Image (tube, helix red, strand yellow):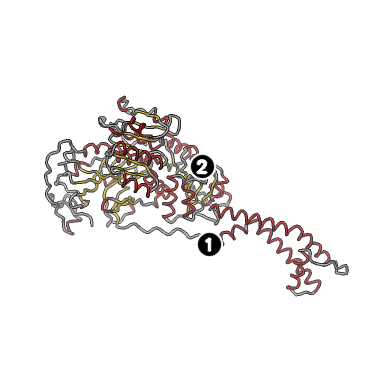
Amino acid sequence: MSDDTNPPPEPSGQRFVVCGDGALAHRLVGELVDRYGLPVTVVLPSLNDNHAPDIAEFGPRTGRPELRPEVLVARRLTAEVLRRAGVAQAAAVALVADDDVTNVDGATIVRELDPDVRLVVRLFNPVLGEGVATSLGDCAVLSGSEIAAPAFVAATLGDEASAYLRLPDDELVRVADRRTLDESAEVVCGLADTGGPELVRLPADEDEADLVLVRAYGRPRAEPPPRRRPRLLRTTALVFGRNLRLALAGMVLLFTAAGAVLGYVRGLAPAEAAYLVLLTALGGAEADPAAPLAEKVTAVVLVLSGVAIVPTVTALVVDALVHARLRVAAGGLVDPVAGHVIVVGLGNIGTRVLQELHSSGLPVVGIDRTESARGVAVGRELGLPVIIGDATSPETLRAASVQTCRALVVLTSDDMTNLETALSGRSAHATARAVSGQPDGSLRVVLRLFDDGFAQRVQRTFGLTHSRSVSYLAAPAFAAAMMGREVIDTIPIGRHLLLVAELPVGAGSDLEGRFCPDLSRPGEVRVIAMRTGRAGQTIWALPRRRPLVRTDRLVVVATRAGLAALLPRAVPSADPPALVEPPPLRLLGAQARHRPADLADPDAPAATGP
């Protein structure tokens, strides 16, 4: 899962503090130490739970002892604990525990200790996040699940997915396969060449990239989610289950035959024969010794059948009503469903994926082992079937109709549970198709796996090629936020990713005075746009002879290592020189707008976007 192996820069004098012991905290420490060469202090609630043992034993890839993180163990965050961690002297503090309340409480304590330190807070609740970011000053609020969810959705939908990114000024770009584009498409840059034996990100020759970034003008409207049948109809369908239908069908056949016999023997009309049959079956008929033999036999059969069938049907009806009420109340799968997506594990990331798949118009069924999981209530509020049970059990997966689903997305926090569920689901799906005589169709399985080595072994051994890591996708954005830089979005490419970031050109920084084309490096960084600070324009065709100034902001696509190398070059100097105003940007006319850059006037930058 490693991106690049560029050595980190020399360590900074200021320390960075990370509070948390989860997978994101583990990745974030590695990102800060190995990518940026920064000294880190980690506050752990214990040394034994979650990822704490791995964090405590973390060693820099470079082997430099001064980069080994300091570890402070405290059961809960208090002012004294955070003071000992050095938050008053820190450059930034990240609160990335799994619980929103813990992170908000820690953030308020840090702000009381130091009104100016930069805060990066992990929160799932967007309303709470907006309030925290507004109230705590220099504070970035991020959600790891919100950052990572699009990658899981894209893996679930496969080639049908088209990832959209919203850049500054509400500009939309999308990730697309070059082979599916028409000539009018405005390609911003080439992202990756996926056709060779090895993936090549940001290739030197952009024409070789089959995965490209394209400007988009409006997001296509998703198909509305399918409407579920009214509650009364769904309950009725549950009540009249298979056993009850068979019992009622047998009773109807018996009564029909008896009615035909009695009608023939006595010469009765059909209505009169039916009336006599019901009275006899329910024990309301009187014995008639003088009746013909056929009538006597029919009457005895009806009485005995009534004694046996009526209680049986009554029991089946009561059982069906109870089960129907429980299933409807629990929000389980009521209607037959096919072509749906099963999401297992309704925690933070599972909830986000569930919502995004539903908003895409796909039928979704959720599974979690606990009623209190965050996504259970969300799924039921959306009207989605949610099953409470152990997803490693084939019975639970069959209850979610795994035999007819299009994809299985397994998102619990335990790698082995995810693998076991994936193998069980794939086996149940294949068995059901073989029994029904359907052609063999492989089930698309998307796994959440933390460890890259384990993911590669799973791919080689079991052929499960679609796996993602939430912490891997989210950690770069948290690390960049700690240094005051904004990661706008991430572009997942397999288990790798590219970062889309906006960087201000610092006063007196290494970037000031340089030209945009000179900053792009194949395989590391590509500048895709520039924003002029005073006019607020977004320049897509980068000017070749206009130097950058401190009022400019760059929008770049980069690998993790490429962004780590570029960030220090944008840091303002302690004693910047006076600002030299750049020459004004002159917009080209409509005819020049689409000319190749090397044919345009070299002294005139290209036009801005619409």
Badge 2 amino acid: Thr
Give the image location of residue 62, x and y in percent. Answer: 31, 27
Cα–Cα span, label 1 and label 2: 32 Å
Q: Is residue 545 above or below residue 219?
A: above
Q: On the picture, is 561 further left or further right than 607?
A: right
Considering only order in the chain, which callout, 2 or 1, is on the residue closer to the N terminus?
1
Q: Is residue 113 left or right of residue 397?
A: left
Q: Position of residue 202 (x, y in %)?
A: 28, 43
The residue at the point 35 percent across, 58 percent down is 220
Q: Which mark is residue 1?
A: none
Disc 2 residue crowd, few under 14, some 14–19, many 20+, Cα 10 Å: many
Mark 1 sits on what residue?
230
| Front residue of this view, candidates 263 and 502 | 502
Is the residue marked by circle 1 packed among few (<14), some (14-19), or many (20+) residues within 10 Å?
few
Instruction: Decide if residue 387 is in sight here.
Output: yes
Q: Is residue 563 visible?
A: no
Closer to the camera in the image, 459 or 525: 525
Residue at the (71%, 56%) spot, across then down: 312
Relative side of 140 to 310, left or right: left
> Which corner quadrant holds the N terminus?
top left
- Amino acid bearing label 1: Pro
Q: Which residue is mark 2?
A: 421
Residue 400 image offset from top left, x and y in percent: 53, 50
| Residue 268 against residue 320 in the figure, above or below | below
Mark 2 secondary-structure assignment: helix
Q: Which sits in the foreground, 296 or 376? A: 376
Toward which corner of the image does residue 550 lie, by quadrant?
top left
